[in-house]
Amino acid sequence: MADEMKIGAYICKGCGIGDRLDAGQLASTATRDGKAAICQQHDFLCNEEGVKMIQADIDNEGVNRVVIAACSRRAKTEAFAFDNVTMHRANLREGVIWVRPDSDDQQETTQEMADDYVRMACAEAKYSKVPETSGQQGVNKNILIVGGGVGGMTAAIEASKAGYPCSIVEKTAALGGAVAQLHKVIPTKAPFADPQDAGVDELAAAIEADDNITVYLNSTTTNIAGAPGRFAADISAESGATQTKEFGAIVQASGFIPYDANKLPEFAYGKNKDVVTQLELEALAKAANGGAIKRPSDGKEVTSVVFVQCAGQRSKKEGHLEHCSGYCCSASIKQAMYFKDQNADVDTTIMYTDLRTPGAGGENFYRSGQKKGVTFTKSVVNEVVDGANPTVKFKDLILNEEAEVEVDLVVLATGMIPNSGQETRADLAVEDAEDKAEAKSSGEEQVIRVEVESILNLDYRQGKDVPHMANGFADSHFICFPYETQRTGIYTAGPTRRPMDAKQAMDDAMGAAMRAIGEAENAGLGKAAHPRSGDLSFPSFRKEGCTQCKRCTVECPFGAINEDEEGYPVYNESRCRRCGTCMGACPVRVISFENYSVDTVGQQLKAVDIPEEFDEKPRIMVLACENDAYPALDMAAQNKLEYSAFARVIPVRCLGSISLSWITDSLNSGFDGIMLMGCPSGDDYQCHFVKGSGTAQERMSKVGDTLETLSLEKERVATYEISITDIHKVPKLINDMADTIEQIGMSPFKF
Amino acid sequence: MAKHEYSYYPGCSSQKGASGSNLQRSVDTMCEELDVKLNQIPDWNCCSASIGYGGGGVLPRMTLSARNIALSEQHHPDQEIVATCAACWLATKEAQERFEDDPSMMAEANQALAEAGLEFKNKKKIRHMVEVLIEDIGYDQIGSGVKRPLEGLKVAGYVGCQTNRPFGIDGESFENPMYLDKLVDTLGGESIKTYEKKVQCCGGALAFSEPVKSQEMIHGIIESAYDNGADVIATPCPLCQANVEIYQDEINAKYGTKFDMPVVYYSQLISVAYGRDAKDSSLDGQIIKAKKLEKIAGK
Amino acid sequence: MSTNTGTVEKYRNNFLKEVEANVEEGDWVKMCMQCGVCAGSCPLGKHWAHPPQEIFMMIRAGKREEVLTSDSMWMCTSCYNCIVRCPRELPITHIMHGLANYAKRLGLAPKAQPTAWFSQVFWDNMMKKGRVNELKLGLSLYFKDGIVSGIKESIKHQKLGMNMMKAKRMSPMELFGGHGVKSAGDLQKIIKKAQEIENARLESYGK
Ligand code: SF4
Ligand code: SF4
Ligand code: SF4
Ligand code: SF4
Ligand code: SF4
Ligand code: SF4
């Protein structure tokens, strides 16, 4: 990087900017206030000539901080892509002229707006550095696949096809997982009418024949350390032997655990041998091998069978699963066909409350079942009574009456529990520690959370597995990408991620494998993953100032930071998504990125010119998340929706990155209002960094105290949840804040 | 030679002295004006409508229609079959489709027809008179012949059931078909787009067997026409026309209403708009006189 | 018929199979997905003891007696609302007609059901001459409960009749002959043959 900082400011007069604003004045603002060494104006900056002009200054004049005063930072990014310089945009088009009316009496405030944005961009330039990779990692093309079911096998085959060597770690003695236990599977091809072969043997044979795929049977991962690009996994065999291998990325396809039907005594499970689960029926069907299915108790050929749907599922009852496993309706249809296809005279009744057959061919399969004479009875099964033949007692919901039927066999459609390992939320880890401490001091017996065995055994500060979402499924980042988890470089696929059938799990695995490959490459180059893909910056901390408070390690949504023995944070660059939540968390402000820091924003807000109190020109600081709120503001501008000329907008990486010091600094330097705009948080979050906006909301609850000590009205600082579609809402919120300030009056802190 | 020629299936209610005879007379007038020639299928028989099922099983009922199709094939080999009665059209078209889907049923019907030396091939299209108007002639063409626009006449277009479902006319929606309104507008009248009983069932044949239950529905059909300011209800269906018109006295007695709402056919509207007098337009066939329409016809 | 008196086990498929074999469009019954749209579409819905959705469920539940003796199917006005709305495209109207016909054939249809009675009269009236004689049909309707109540009914509807005659839409001449198919005998032969074919098929069920 060049030793001397040199700012080049370029003012565009295109897109109407030249007509609306005094470009000459902007240029003198850039040189006088912004300390730009070079400042040039251009009629059409993003055309070839304009770009060449900038490049020439970089090449010949040593410009290494480029300030472009033109359109939004989201526009023309390809034209303005220069190497080895930092880039700063003063948003004069979407941020000024498009949101202000073109009239003489507004001219003054509009120009002030533009001047401020030029000052702010120059201030940011002054405090930014050109990011360089840390060199922590190199490219490692090996992909670790945890789980050898159809999902894991598919991931391996796909990754290998793409040229990436894979290792499958499978806990049992054979590949195939749950699907290997099935007689047949739900059809995946038109006309979706009949059960089809699972194809497990073909998959296993393909794996066997592939030199690029290594299989570890009877093995588990007992420790995984490192980060994308440099994962070090201990693979331990049942015998105890352990070997450590390096991987670039991980696919977790650990499948599901069948629900324990012993929790359903009301259905006589465990008492009557002829009450079986779907999985147990598969074994009976396999044994029959196309002949008549015989029931377990006495080997009699089954002539009548009832399927009890949602057994222990979709229910809030103690011990039941709350979710719908999604595959068991189709599975019952398939199993009823085992009987019907062999002998159409067998009575097969599926007792359901809602029949759910998702997928492209789901409805076709349902119809095919009906055509084959499977009877669908909308009903709630209350009880299965033990006897020589089990008797099913149910309420027929269509005929609204209690009824019962005696049959040869009852099949319970019990669901899937995700095999996703331990609950690993950081806050739980902290709570656990607190609980333990408390229990110790009070001498009470400790309440211990039921320990589930870990799948991955990650050596992460925040826990051993990927964080769980609803009902224990390890899905996470729905806003970004389905396979994404809160652990960069680890992708879940199949029923670990959400309930699904075999076909869906295989499709899922392909997607996850492709993501894993992409991240292995990405991490090798030191680039950030989604949503700041390609970003080369990474957080670092000043050890001298750090108080070992652990806030950064706890609040990082991606578990990127470990702790060393002394309690200092240890950053794992390629686990990091560059959200800045750690930076916002640090009470002593020692965390920073080369191109994003407490200063790059803090100096911008200080660069804003604050008029005297009696000028009646308030100033509103808007800190807007770059993922949703800032684009929404841009789109409002495209729609020519106006907002107050007193607003000054600064994009931030995430609401979670906001340092409280920015707020106190703004108030102290005389801003009249402060608006924080982030993505919706909570269960239905839309934060691109999962927890950033939620964390920020919590922190902001403390701002009230600051306002109180300054004797300022609490209305002056407000937090908003903005979605990218809130195009009409954002300008209105700004105008509302301007109105509020008019009512409560100007801030007294103007010097 | 007439511009359009069809093999015509009039149906029982359109016979002389029957409940729908005024439909027949106005259709004759309308066809004269539009240069349409209807060749009656010689010796046609009843289709058993949609009520014969109590006495006749599927095959006998379908065979009734098969005979009509056979006669049409024999006498009018190159003409499509056209019906004016909703039930006739529906029964014949339904039979035609069923025979097409079920060759063994068709063979059985032919076996029965053979008793009288008949046979059918089932290749004919079965159409409703309204389809002829819309598809073969077209709104523009119809509009261009209007001599006496139905100015100021507010018409509640009552499509009913069987002209509308299950086949529909001109691909229009089952819940809100627009063709009758469009036709009224084409004739210079004022269609009531807000008439919400447009496709309400009148009870059909059950108006005879379940008069109380049916008249409750008919009451609604008429009430809504009043609520929407209608001068007249217009319909394409002879059973609808009869049911909605003739029970108004009985409904008034039961509900204490003063209904006196004329119910006419689209063919009567066209006849009047084309300048024909009240008699040619069979307005004398009304039990409840369509006074406003008569006035236009008398101009 | 073999199954005429046979008992049917509940929630087994015997009756469904019987319906599939013997009732018009009966093989569609199993395709109903119990959404209830048809039940909500019937114009006389509130008078049905069991709307079509329920009838289909009852068939699947083996409730033979309840279904065939029900007067529900006889409430169908043939409006075709259900058919155009059913997401599974069941020919519901025809199944109702078919069930009604089948119940009547087995002698299980409710005795004093007016539509059951009327549809038979209609059929007989039509079969005489090949076309419907509206006057005779109407009169037989009024006299269905015997001569005394018939005269009462006639007087009640006298005005209606007079109105119709005035409008030339009812002819007293119909009483003495009236319209008809010229070759009515041929028609009768044809339909008799069709009936024979159908009866033979039905009688062979279960044998
Ligand atoms: S698009 Fe941007 S850089 Fe290009 S002329 Fe417009 S404002 Fe200038
Ligand atoms: S898929 Fe069907 S059986 Fe399984 S939980 Fe969902 S609704 Fe119940
Ligand atoms: S920037 Fe975000 S992901 Fe990276 S270490 Fe900080 S909090 Fe974690
Ligand atoms: S938040 Fe700041 S002070 Fe606390 S551990 Fe992290 S770097 Fe150190
Ligand atoms: S056709 Fe019959 S069953 Fe269907 S909605 Fe109309 S009345 Fe009901
Ligand atoms: S509308 Fe069709 S699918 Fe729905 S309940 Fe009625 S018959 Fe069954």
Image: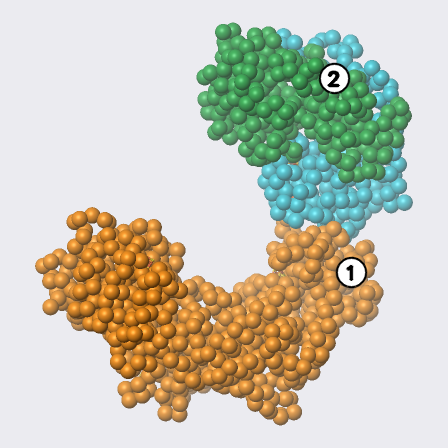
Chain colours: A orange, B green, C cyan
Of the pair C31 and A312, the residue shown nearer to us = C31
Residue at mark 2 to residue at mark 1: CA–CA distance: 57 Å
Image disc number at residue A339: 1
Q: State which chain disc 2 sits on.
A: B
Residue A402: in sight, yes or no? no
Instruction: Name the kind of residue labelled 1 in the image.
Output: Phe
- Relative to B110, say whether B25 is above or below: above
Q: Position of residue A650 (x, y in %)?
A: 28, 65
Is C102 left, or right, of A71 in this rendering? right
Q: Position of residue C92 (x, y in %)?
A: 68, 39
- Rendered image quadrant of residue B162: top right
Residue occupying the point 68% across, 65% down = A412
- Rendered image quadrant of residue B210: top right
- Rendered image quadrant of residue A564: bottom left
Q: Position of residue A204 (x, y in %)?
A: 71, 76
Residue occupying the point 82% across, 58% down = A343
Image disc number at residue A380: none
Of the pair A23 and A697, the residue shown nearer to us = A23
- Relative to A280, say whether A438 is above or below: below
Crowd band around label 1 with a 10 angstrom C-alpha radius: few (<14), some (14–19), many (20+): many
Is A290 left, or right, of B286 in this rendering? right
Q: Which residue is mark 2?
A: B40
Secondary element type, mark 1: helix
Q: Nearer the viewer, mark 2 or mark 1?
A: 2
Residue occupying the point 57% across, 81% down = A142
**Number of callouts:** 2
- Asked if both marks, 2 and 1, belong to the same chain, the answer given is no
